[in-house]
Each structure stands twice: as structure tokens, then as C-alpha cells.
Image: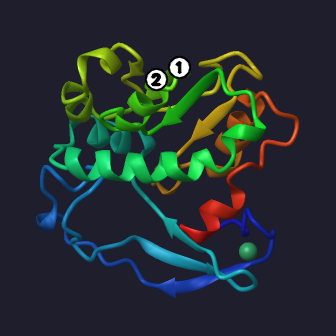
Amino acid sequence: MRSCIICGRKLKLFREEKINHSNLDAYSYSSRKIPEYMHYALYECENCHVLYSDCTVEKQEIFRNYKEADYDSGDEADNASRTYYKYLCKYLPNYQANRALDIGTGNGGYLEILMRKGIDVVGIEPSDAPIRQAAPAIRDKIINDVFKKGMFEAESFDIISLFQTIEHIPDTENTLKEIFSLCNYSEPTLFKDEIRVA
Ligand SMILES: [Zn+2]
């Protein structure tokens, strides 16, 4: 297990792996679900107490599971989108926001709100099912894939969001660096505090 990506200190075992594969179903890899109370081995940073999961499943298998997962939480996602937008509004007056990227966008409810405000939007969503449930106007704006390096040009977005998504990204540190490089602002730390609260 590597060191903490936040503070660089050592990680120590927090909980042993607890997995029962017979408890997995079509919703296990969906964005909202009834918890199975299972986990891979969990490691905790000895300094900042961030928890890390030592997932032993191959990346390609995880991505396939996300792609095929079922989805029945469109209403909750739409409610959450309105909350996300409320937080965004605190910052919008200070920034020129022309183009937004939402990674792990689900049914694109949040992008729909931004689009209505005149912002050009792009979503990324690995699961097929939520995209099928997206409003027709937003469906074409969603790329059905996992986020990958090189998908977009540097500094091409004014707003980038990952709501309830960062914990699904296997290579968090490098992915965040890539995401920061896509941000149009020299110090893209806009929502750092909000993420901590959430
Ligand atoms: Zn730490």
C-alpha cells in the first residue's frame, strides 16, 4: 500500500477485507444503492485519517461492472443536482463560466441546470443505464466512458465537477492532476472547502 496522497504519511490497516460475492447484484456498482456492508481492506492515514481502499479487482473489470450496473435513482440525482447548483451559485458571480465538465454525471441532471443557464456542458458517465434515462436534450452531451487522460484539451473548462465520484477513481492522484490541467483557472481550487464539508 502506498502513502497518503493528501499528506504523504504512512497508511496503516484500518479494517480487514470483508467481501461476500453472493451479496452482489445488478445495483452493486450503481451510483446509489442499498449498502451491502462489504469492503476491501481499508487503510487509514496515520496523520490526516483519510481512508483508502485496497481494491484488488482489475481496472477493466471495475469499468465493465460500472458500465453494466442498473440505475433507479434518477429522482435522488435530480434533487442532488439542485443542491450542487446552489453551492455553485456562491461562486459563479466571481467567475466567467462558459463551459462545464461533469465527471460521473449519471443522468446529467446537473448539466441540464447549467445548460439552462447558458453554459456549454459535457458529461462523462461510464454506466449505460443512467444515460438512457437522461433528458433527450442532455443525452448527446454525455460521453459514455470513464474519464481518461487526453480526452480534452488543456484549460478548456471553467467548471469541473466530480460529485460522489472521486472514490470510484482508481488512480486518484494522477487523475486529479489531469483534471486540474483541464481547468481554465491558474489556481483551480474552487470547491476544495465544499468537498471537505460534503
Ligand atoms: Zn494523510
Residue 68 visible (yes or no): yes
Q: Does the residue labelled 2 lie within 8 Å of ligand 1?
A: no
Q: Disc 1 residue type?
A: Gly
| Front one among 8 and 132 | 132
In the image: residue 46, left or right of residue 77: right
In what element is the residue under mark 2? helix
Whole-percent x, y for residue 90 in the image: 65, 51
In the drawing, what numbered circle is on residue 162? none
According to the picture, the residue beneath numbered tag 1 turns out to be 118
Q: What residue type is labelled 2?
A: Met
Residue under the image location 27 percent in, 72 percent down: 19
Q: In which quarter of the image is ligand 1?
A: bottom right
| Marks 1,2: beta carbons within 8 A | yes
Mark 2 — residue? 115
The secondary element bearing badge 1 is classed as loop
Residue 177 lies in what quarter of the image?
top right
- Percent coordinates x, y for residue 158 in the rendering: 70, 29
User: Does 83 sit above or below residue 51?
Assistant: above
Front one among 54 and 88: 88
Is 72 above or below relative to 8? above
Crowding near pointer 1: few (<14 within 10 Å), some, many (20+)? Answer: few
The residue furthest right is: 186
Say if residue 171 shows up in the picture.
Answer: no
Name the residue located 67 percent from the left edge and 39 percent from the top edge: 92
* Residue closest to the far front: 93
Q: In this view, does 158 lie to the left or right of 70?
A: right
Q: Residues under labels 1 and 2: Cα distance?
A: 5 Å
Residue drawn where x is 68% and y is 53% of the image: 191
